[in-house]
Every structure is written in C-alpha cells, then in structure tokens.
Image: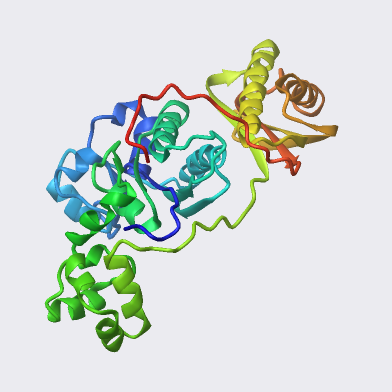
Amino acid sequence: MWRHRLRKIIHVDMDAFFASVEQLDQPELRGRAVVVGGDPKGRGVVAAASYEARRFGIRSAMPCGEAARRCASAVFVRPRMERYREVSQQIRAIFESVTTLVEPLSLDEAYLDVTQNSLEEALAGRVAIHLKRRIRDEVGLTASAGVGPNKLIAKIASDLEKPDGLVIIPPERVLSFVSSLPVERLWGVGPATAKRLHEMGLRQAGDVAERSVEDLVNRFGNQGRTLHALSRGIDERPVHNHREPKSRGSETTFEGDVTSEARLSLELGRLAEDVSRRLGRLGRAGRTVTLKVRYSDFTTITRSRTLRAPTQDGATIARAAQELLTTATEAGERPIRLMGVNVSSLDQDDTPIQLQLPFKEMAPY
C-alpha cells in the first residue's frame, strides 16, 4: 500500500516553551499560571502561556488584559528572547548529536530525519524517546514528539498528546489516520482554501481523497495535486538542513558567584568532559577551544586557543581551557557567574558512533 520511499521523520515540539523556560529559571513559578507577554494594564499580547494558564482559556496572541480577566492569579513575565534562544541552541545540539538532518521551524520545534542516525537505531520511536529523555535530563524541559513516514504525519502526531507526549504513526496506519482529519490540518490549507473545500462538501481529508486528481486540479490548479496527495498521507517534502554543525559546547551558571580557582578548575573539567561526549555523539573532533566567562557584573568575555591537531578528548580540552582561564581572564580576582567551554573548527570525519540505549521493545517503526 505504501509505495513511496520509506523515511522515518520525527517532529519535536517543546511544551509551552517560553513559559516553561520561565518556570525552569524561577522555581517559584512552577505550578502557577504563567503568561509571557506585555503589561496586562497596557496593550500587550500573550506570547506564551503555561499549561496552568491555558486551563483558563488563555492563548497566544490574546490581549494581556483579557488574560488577566480570565485568571486573576496569573503571573505576567516579560519575554527574554536571548534566554529562549540560548535554551533552543541547547536543544538543537541534542538533535544534531543524533542526525545531521535537522530542520528548525522556530525556537521550539523542528523536524528530524532519523532514517539514518548516529545511534544506529532502527526504530524511530526509540530515537524519539532518547531525544525526549535527553531534553528532560540535560535541559530540564519536556517535549512532545510525533513519529511518522513524512513531515505531515509527524507534525500532526506531535500535537495529539501534549504535554510530554509521544505518538507513533507507522506507514500502515497512515491512511486511516489521515482520513478523519479536518481539511484544515493538511499542510498549506489556510482559511481561504478551507472555505472553498467546505463549499464543495469536503470537510475531512478522506473526502478530498475520494475526489479525482483532475477534479481538484480543475478547481485549485497545481495546489489540487498537492491536496490530493496530502489527503492520502503522501508528503515527499524532505527535511532540509541549512547548515553543518560548526561547534559543540557546554556552559553552566553558578548558583552563587565563584572566586575560588579550585572550584573553577573542577567545573572546567566537567564542562570539558560534557563537550567531549557531545563531540563523540557527533563523531567529530575540533581544533579550536574557546572559554567563555561572565563576571558578576554581567561583563562577558571569550578567549580561544587553536590546537595543533583536532581532538575530542576531554582531558585535552580541559587543559586548553584551564590555560585560557589562568592566563587570559581575571579568575580569582573578579567573581564569575557563568562559565562555558566550546570546541569549533570541526574536522570532516562524521563517522557515526554507536550508542546503546536501554529501551523496552516497541512497535517496529
């Protein structure tokens, strides 16, 4: 029945991303209705709402004043885009350690083609579990994932069991899955197209699939051919990766400012080992080690050193970072609030490294 090239696509969508980051950074907000947006007394709109806030009907793009009226106990927080981008980059690094075919759609969602992956894992469902687990353990957030043979199916599936959901649609279930979907769920169908389809009596994807290609092309032009394919669960759009990974890094923000050089050295060793593991998952080595230091007054500096040969060895990375810390910063004199280690100038050896995952058996897709 499925005659098209079999791919294994995962769509990962972070749960209430902006609001969840705020709850992560401010534990006192956990369990509370959090609204990221403007002043509820002004003309601002909601950028994001926690799931606790959504229970009151608060949604993105709603005026903040309306959100405040719906939930008097809601906590309003100004957006911090730099922080959201920082967390998004952490999540992107996790994706890229598994596959080079990553297509971000925004800061909080992306497609991944895991037909081939660095885990050498045949079951896309297991890869999705691995990604969700690492996002939870390394970032502290939850993500929902959809798994399917193409972008259309994976994206729709990721939205079905939020938050922290995982829905797997194998190829043999695609037609039955798609047929009952409203036409609005098909890729590229906006309000105008949906209205025209409704006027034709076509409200579900299965209704569209029953029409001939010729009829749909006569009414919608070339879009009609696409509509016919999508209504049958066929989506040949590839996952596009627009950039090669250029570096791997790790950083930490201390609970209190640090002046102890011994403490900083210990932390450098931990960061270097973390970078080493990330390079290992990617199957690459790098030549340039960069140390990032943010002092207590938020002044941030970076210092770099280029090695003679590429490496992914944690001890080598730590030695280079330690030399930079000692000779090129004011460690021990000025309190430090954040420190990071990055390795760039990656070589071209992308031989995948196998990782063993303790997953239970799942359906074979």
Residue located at (35% from left, 51% from top): 154
Nearest the viewer among 173 and 57 is 173
The image quarter in which residue 212 lies: bottom left
Camera-side residue of 363 and 84: 363
Residue 40 lies, in percent from the top left, at 25, 51
Q: Is residue 260 visible?
A: yes
Q: Give the colour scheme of this rendering.
A: rainbow
> Residue 181: x percent and y percent?
19, 60
Instruction: Locate residue 292 relative to residue 205 in the image: left or right.
Output: right
The image quarter containing residue 308 is top right
Task: Return the residue nearer the eye: 362 or 251.
Answer: 362
Left or right: 64 in relation to 313: left
Q: Is residue 334 above or below residue 284?
A: above
The residue at the far right in this view is 308
Q: Would residue 39 be seen by someone viewing this image from the given angle? A: no
User: Which quadrant of the rendered structure holds the C terminus?
Assistant: top left
Q: Is residue 357 left or right of residue 176?
A: right
How many circles with numbers are drawn on the protein?
A: 0
Image position of 69 with respect to 218: above or below? above
Q: Quadrant of the N terminus?
A: bottom left
Q: Is residue 142 above or below residue 176?
A: above
Residue 38 to residue 329: above or below: below
Of the pair 348 and 66, the residue shown nearer to us: 348
Query: Which residue, as the protein is rendered here, is positioned at the far bottom?
Result: 218
Residue furthest to the top in view is 262
What residue lies at 44% left-to-right and 36% top-to-bottom?
127
Q: Position of residue 350 (x, y in %)?
A: 68, 41
Q: Position of residue 311 (x, y in %)?
A: 77, 30
Q: Residue at x 39, y 60 (%)?
A: 3
